[in-house]
Image (cartoon, helix red, strand yellow):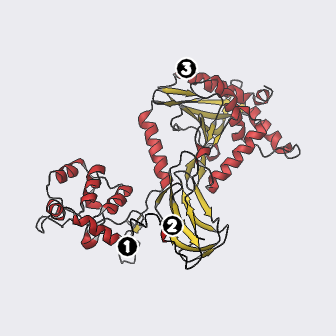
Amino acid sequence: MANIVIMPRQGQSVESCIITTWQKKKGDRVETGDILFSYETDKSAFDEPSQFSGTILELLAAEGDVVPCLDPVCIIGEEGEDISALIPGSAKEEAPAAEEAKAEEVVETKAVEAEATVSEADGARVFISPRAKNLALKTGVDMTKVVPTGPHGRIIERDINKALDAGFVATTSLVEDFLAGKPVVVEEAAPAVEEVKEAPVAAAPADDFRAYTDEPMSNIRKVIAKSMHASLSEMAQLTLNASFDATNLLAYRAKLKANGEALGLSKITINDMILFAAARVLPNYPEINANLIDNTFRKYKHANIGMAVDTDRGLLVPVIFGSDTLTLAELSAQAKTLAGKAREGKLSPDEMSGGSFTISNLGSMGIESFTPVINPPQTAILGVCCTTNRLKDDGKVYPAMGLSLTFDHRAVDGAPAAKFLKELCTALENFDLLLAK
């Protein structure tokens, strides 16, 4: 009996996923546990193992397709099985794409061609179906960038959808001209967005210093870009910089490094210790341990700290929930587990949502001060910097570690933000005493 494989749901907030790679193709034999395909949410990547043994009889989605969660993606069964009843829309949509395009042409063909066709003297000729035209005008897709796939070079609805995914949005004037029935000059069709082009290199003995490659932005990079742009354009962000004497913190870290293994402790890092201190201080500042959503404060009862992790796929921020309830060893263990899952692309969306505050540590890269960007809809973020040697009033040298707190001035005033930063510095300077609380 044939079985349908569906797109899994990775977290309650995920509505669809992108198929990045098919590991198997139609006609391949698979066993239970074999990886069928790889897919992405907006922040994570996953491999989908087969739950069935058999032959892949049909692929219902292609690489690059955005598939709604729980929708079918392929059919596995035995060779020769009749699977016509299992193919979505088979009873209503058996016609191939060419026949579908032909059906579109039947309605208002002459009117559409008269409206959307340009004479040879004015430019290239444009043919577009009624449904495609309506969608283009509704979404503002730049029809000069659409690659037609319908019969006789005609633009059909799926071409508009693909151009929309590629970001080919028309200017207002172009849409107005088209609505008014004015001629639209079509430029040479753009290549599909997935393609990577390399500039032609001149056939000369020397290198062409103008050579380059165009690479499409990854899905995760698009999400990061959108989030960061919204953060900076919608918030009133201000950064306070401070430093603390890290002598005691570094000494305690040295003790843990020397004796931690004998005491059954994992390798606790400076970052773990900063997470621990922030988790203990945050509940004292409800406006900083919060989200601001449509002029409403969401103040968390516990410190749910997001931890910025640099990965090959982009910046990911897993959340350590209830950080203020964890021991240093427990917090360190969770931080390592989440960081590992982030780098392996195995985080679920639920593990990256619900954060009340974020910490970004660039100290290991020698950064002395920076302006971290708030992770919306949170109201603040802490940047951790490297240590630098400074002189005390008595002439002694001490290691000073910098902290940069960016906060949303709409939600938090400067005084409480400064008090939070000062209390955090005091806690870190007296870390051994903080453990006793």
Residue 6: quadrant of the picture: bottom right
Query: For mark 1, what is the residue?
Result: 201
Query: For mark 3, what is the residue?
Result: 415
Which residue is pictured at 55% across the width and 79% down the height?
Answer: 80
What count of labels does the image hold? 3
Q: Compared with residue 140, is residue 355 higher up or lower down, i.e. above or below?
A: above
Query: For mark 2, what is the residue?
Result: 86
Which quadrant is the N terminus positioned in? Answer: bottom right
In the rendered image, residue 11, in percent from the top left (x then y), is placed at: 58, 48
Of badges 3 and 1, nearer the viewer stands 3
Circle 3 packing at 10 Å, graded few (<14), some (14-19), many (20+), is few
* 63 left or right of 319 in image: left
- Outermost bottom residue: 80
Circle 2 packing at 10 Å, graded few (<14), some (14-19), many (20+), is some
In the rendered image, residue 125, in percent from the top left (x then y), is placed at: 18, 67
Q: Measure the alpha-carbon separation of dots 3 and 1.
A: 59 Å
